[in-house]
Structures are given as C-alpha cells and as structure tokens.
Amino acid sequence: MWHGERQKYAPPSPEIRITSMIKAAIITVSDRCSRGQREDLTGEALRVLLEEDGFHVAEKVIVPDERDEIVRKLIEFSDVKGYELIVTNGGTGVSPRDVTPDATREVIEREVPGMAEAMRMESFRITPHALISRAVVGIRKQSLIVNLPGSPKGAKENYQVIRKAIPHALEKIRGSTEECAPPGS
Ligand SMILES: Nc1ncnc2c1ncn2[C@@H]1O[C@H](COP(=O)(O)OP(=O)(O)OP(=O)(O)O)[C@@H](O)[C@H]1O
Ligand SMILES: Nc1nc2c(c(=O)[nH]1)N[C@H]1C(S)=C(S)[C@@H](COP(=O)(O)O)O[C@H]1N2
C-alpha cells in the first residue's frame, strides 16, 4: 500500500534512524550559490534532514552547473572518499545549464529508476512542474547517488518520498545477504 500523501509531510521517524554511522555528502549545483550570489538554503535544509535521519554529513560542497565539475566531485566522493550516500541538489530541469542528471548518468554503474520515478510521481501531486525534473538515482561502487531539485521546497519534498527506502538500499549496496523479508512473508 502506498502512503504517499501522508509520507510527504511526515516528520523524520525513529524507525529509519541509521544505527551505524553512514557517511553522506551533499553537492549543491548552482551557478548563483557558487558565485556567492545566493545563500545555499537547499544544501543546508538537506543537511538537517539527513542528520535527523542519522546520517553523518561529512561534506557539503557547492559547484556551478558545469558537467565536468559535477562529474569530478561525484567520482571523488565515491571513489576517493567512499561516501555511501551522495545527494545532489539543483540542475535537474530542462534549462540549457541543467546538467546534473547528465553528469550523474556519466558516472553511475547501475541505475535505480524506481526512486526517481517515485519522486516524480509523488511530486506531480504537488506541482505539474515535477514532470520536467530529469533527476536520476544510481549506484557507483559503494555509493548511492540521488539527484534532487534545486529549490528548498522541491528538494525536501523529493527526499521525503525516498528516505524510507535509503537505509535498506545502502545495506544491499554494501553486499548484505540478509533476507529482505522474514521467511513466509
Ligand atoms: N541552493 C539553493 N538554495 C536556495 N534556493 C535555491 C538553491 N538552488 C536553487 N534554488 C531556487 O530554486 C530555483 C530552481 O533551481 P535551479 O537549480 O533551476 O537553479 P537556477 O534558477 O538555474 O539558478 P542557479 O543555478 O544559479 O542556482 C532557483 O531559481 C532558486 O529560486
Ligand atoms: N516535490 C516537488 N518537486 C519539484 C518541485 C517542487 O516544488 N516540489 N519543483 C519542480 C521544478 S519547478 C523544476 S524546474 C524541476 C527541476 O528543478 P531544478 O532544475 O531546480 O533541479 O523540479 C521540480 N520538482
């Protein structure tokens, strides 16, 4: 059963709190923020949400809407720093400089389409503009990479849609062989 409407505004619940310290990183993709012309409210809002959910936000960086710079950061955060959750915000739309999904596709080894589809589907209940988000979710090495929209509202709403699926996804990416469901269920 899908509880989308209720889940959207549900406060972070203890049931998904991560027990081991999982390192996360936030990449804010924004020309204005990178030039110091706008405060990075979205990255900060995501930091709060991720920490409420028990992640350790090890790093938050701001990069301009430049494909090569996004690719470089994603590879560094995954291959060198080993962050298990990498959340980008901004640049997922259809304007000429929106290239975050393209950079993400360049680095991921496997796509997780259900997460991106669910974000679009649930967001469409809130705004028709959700349909122009090209956000991608995928895996590179041990990292789950999630694209979120640029506005604080959009980023928070989209994160709420997938947050409960993230801990199990990370366990599986790590290679956990635990059964997904209790026997017989
Ligand atoms: N990091 C941020 N903090 C606060 N607001 C943001 C942030 N990023 C985007 N926004 C808001 O969300 C809107 C849509 O984000 P989008 O990623 O399309 O940015 P944009 O308009 O291309 O500008 P820029 O790349 O300079 O941030 C922005 O116009 C702005 O109002
Ligand atoms: N839930 C939700 N999803 C949303 C939005 C929003 O306000 N709420 N904004 C949309 C808008 S206006 C755009 S243009 C696309 C892409 O956003 P981005 O270019 O800022 O990444 O995400 C969309 N997704």
Image: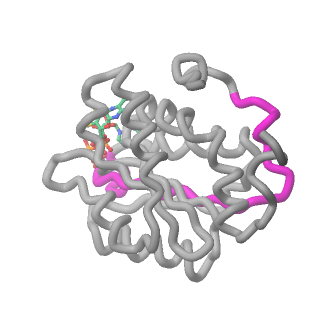
Work out which residue is located at the far left of the displayed protein and give it: 96
Q: Ligand 2 quadrant? A: top left
**Number of on-image labels:** 0
Q: Quadrant of the C terminus?
A: top right
At horizontal 31% and vertical 22% (from top left) the residue drawn is 127
- The answer to if 23 sits in the magenta stretch is yes
Q: Quadrant of residue 24?
A: bottom right
Q: Nearer the viewer, residue 169 or 132?
A: 169
Give the colour scheme shown. Answer: one colour
Q: Quadrant of residue 160?
A: top right
Left or right? Give the position of 55 relative to 36: right
Left or right? Give the position of 165 relative to 33: right
- Measured from the top left, where is residue 42 in percent x and y? 47, 40
Q: Nearer the viewer, residue 22 or 141?
A: 141
Q: Quadrant of the N terminus?
A: top right
- The answer to if 148 sits in the magenta stretch is no
Left or right? Give the position of 80 relative to 131: right
At horizontal 30% and vertical 50% (from top left) the residue drawn is 91
- Measured from the top left, where is residue 25 in percent x and y? 59, 60
Q: Nearer the viewer, residue 45 or 33?
A: 45
Left or right? Give the position of 94 relative to 61: left
In the rendered image, the vertical position of residue 86 relative to residue 160, given as above or below: below
Work out which residue is located at the far front of the displayed protein and give it: 184
At horizontal 13% and vertical 53% (from top left) the residue drawn is 96
- Measured from the top left, where is residue 17 in percent x and y? 79, 42
In the rendered image, the vertical position of residue 19 relative to residue 177, given as above or below: above
Which residues make up the magenta segment? Answer: 12-37
- Measured from the top left, where is residue 28 in percent x and y? 43, 53
At horizontal 38% and vertical 62% (from top left) the residue drawn is 63
Work out which residue is located at the far bottom of the displayed protein and give it: 80
